[in-house]
Amino acid sequence: MAQPAPGAARIEIIGLTKRFLTPKGRPFTAIQDVSFTVEPGQFCAIVGPTGCGKSTTLGQVSGLDRPSAGRVLVGGQEVRGITKGVSFMFQADALFPWKTVLGNVMIGPVLAGRAKKQAARLARDWLRRVGLAGFEDRYPHQLSGGMRKRVAMAAALINEPKILLMDEPFGALDVQTKAIMQTELLGLWEQTRPSVLFITHDLDEAVALADRVLIMTSGPGSIKQSFEIDLPRPRGEVQAIRHEPRFLELQHQIWSSLKDEVERAYAQTAGVAA
Amino acid sequence: MRTTLTTEQPVRTTDITPTPAVTAADADPGLQSAARRARRRRTALVWLGRIVVPVVIIGGWQWFTAAGVVDKFFFGQPSGVWHSLVQLFTKGTAFGSIWLNLEITIREAVYGFLLGTGAGIVFGLALGQNRFLADVLGPYIKVANSIPRIILGSIFVVAFGLGTFPKVLLAAVLVFFIVFFNAFQGVREVDQNLVANVRVLGASPFQVARHVTVPSALTWIIASLHTAFGFAIIGALVAEVLGAQHGIGLVIVQAQGQFDMDTVFACMLIMAVVTLVAEYLLTLLERRVLGWRPPSRSEVAAI
Ligand SMILES: Nc1ncnc2c1ncn2[C@@H]1O[C@H](COP(=O)(O)OP(=O)(O)OP(=O)(O)O)[C@@H](O)[C@H]1O
Ligand SMILES: [Mg+2]
């Protein structure tokens, strides 16, 4: 396994609980007593039924949100306010519609206090790396969904984060584009090796990319099981790895663990609706 | 580390990496000229329609009044309106040349517009970003908004006399509420994902405003300026009607007193031209500031 980046940080989540107030004023526990650790430079995927609190967990790690109970430590430091050195790729499109592609990618270094010129040079370089050279002056609405995701990926990686938080980044893409983006992500990740927390609904994606896959239970969410993915790195083409026996074996194990949760979550929401 | 990062990215992505070059199909000359012809034909049709509409309306008006079906004493007549226009510009008004009066009215409207817009933006952004302030002041703004504001004109004229100040004030008050509500709403509609995005990147509250809130609210604010300028003109005119020494509003009241409908219409026309010019300037501003916006479906340059 390649070395983690010198700056990569350990993420420790200890007894994390988050409650929300529902519009009616009743407390609602989204996640309960979640504990796990992501080693520096580790690629950790989280899968779980919809609404189990995956996005909520990421919100606590980034410092956008505060835990109701428990602690989040990043690099040994308790998270207070926004965590330093974090990049976040959101579930929804988070590009600035009024900025060009270049402007969107530049925002990270600019906010980090770099000179405009230097930031632009860096952004151009990253756009080239995600295969978008020549598209600097376009606006997001002039791009395809896959291209927008590439811009978001360049914007997330340009600051060379210690920690990369990704919330279903490729959820809305078609299968082929998704495979290409996954391969690209792996390639870029292997160069800088930040610690990654990667949320997905796609088991294949989780197994193909991650070092470890965590299964979350349906609401209130907590960690049900953890699987070490011992497929060798660098993994290369994501499509190719899908047919290896070890991949299928792991995928099958994880699916049987997840299936119960998905069914339980479905019964829960159906019960509420009935 | 940075230098090692700039190594070439895998070639395996080339199959979907789009190239911005023009493809052979786009450059087909036959297709291009067909598209150009279709566009020209449409433009010609639009202009024909645009000419027919005023010819019918003005011609009909002239014809009905000339035939005596409609009394031109009450409703004026296009030829009379034209005559009044010529009179206004050659002989001037009872209150000095038309240019002087026009200049005064425009100045009042523009000052009112700027004042109202400035205040509207400041309050809108402040209240939109500060929930506490919004909760405290919200009910009072609703109350203020439900006052028929034209009546404030009477108060301003009595309080501040016949000069330009009460006109500027009335125009500003009318403009303020329009811009304020739009700025406020604009801030409220800000995409929270974008806010979260820059916050994670370490933006200070000021940077969040600079990079997200203000640009996002700008769409709403600029859209409101078109309506707002119309209201600035209304504010200035109404305040002049209520009491003034100069201005188009005053010319209108005087003409009304003399049952000179042609002059009233002539003044209306002049103010319409002023508003159109302002509209044009605002559109230029809009294009400059909001150039990033996706065109609506029908505007997309498609064939
Ligand atoms: N601000 C909030 N107020 C109240 N409830 C919330 C809030 N945010 C999330 N929740 C609730 O917390 C639970 C977990 O939400 P979360 O977005 O973390 O789910 P998720 O696992 O990311 O789901 P998905 O996979 O569909 O994105 C959900 O039941 C949701 O309704
Ligand atoms: Mg989610």
Image (spheres, helix red, strand yellow):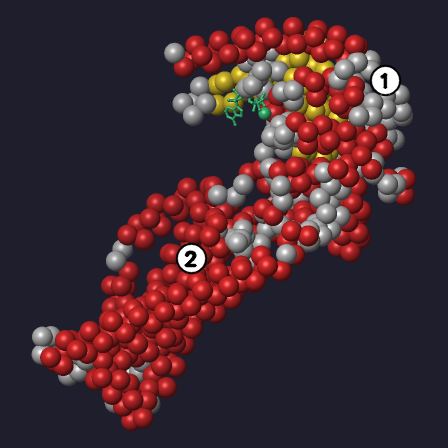
Q: Is residue A92 something one can see in this rendering?
A: yes
> Hey, which quadrant is residue A263 in on the image?
top right
Instruction: Indicate the chain on which mark 1 is placed.
Output: A
Q: Is residue B91 above or below residue B116?
A: below
Label 2: how many Cα within 10 Å (few below 14, some 14–19, many 20+) = some
Question: What residue lies at 60% left-to-right and 24% top-to-bottom?
Answer: A56
**Nearer to me, A30 or A15:** A30
**Nearer to me, B242 or B159:** B242
Q: Check disc 1 and give the amino acid type.
A: Pro
Q: Is residue B8 above or below residue B125?
A: above
Q: Quadrant of ligand 2?
A: top right
* Residue at disc 2, secondary structure: helix
Q: Check disc 2 and give the amino acid type.
A: Ser
> Hey, which quadrant is residue A242 in on the image?
top right
Question: Residue A178, how many percent across, how many down?
Answer: 68, 29
**Nearer to me, A36 or A137:** A137
Question: What residue lies at 21% left-to-right and 84% top-to-bottom?
Answer: B80
Relative to A117, is A269 on the left or the right?
left
> Hey, which quadrant is residue B195 in on the image?
top right
Quadrant for the N terminus of chain B, please: top right
- What residue would you read off at disc 1? A232
Question: What residue lies at 38% left-to-right and 61% top-to-bottom?
Answer: B227
Question: Residue A192, how many percent across, how many down?
Answer: 84, 33
- What residue would you read off at disc 2? B224
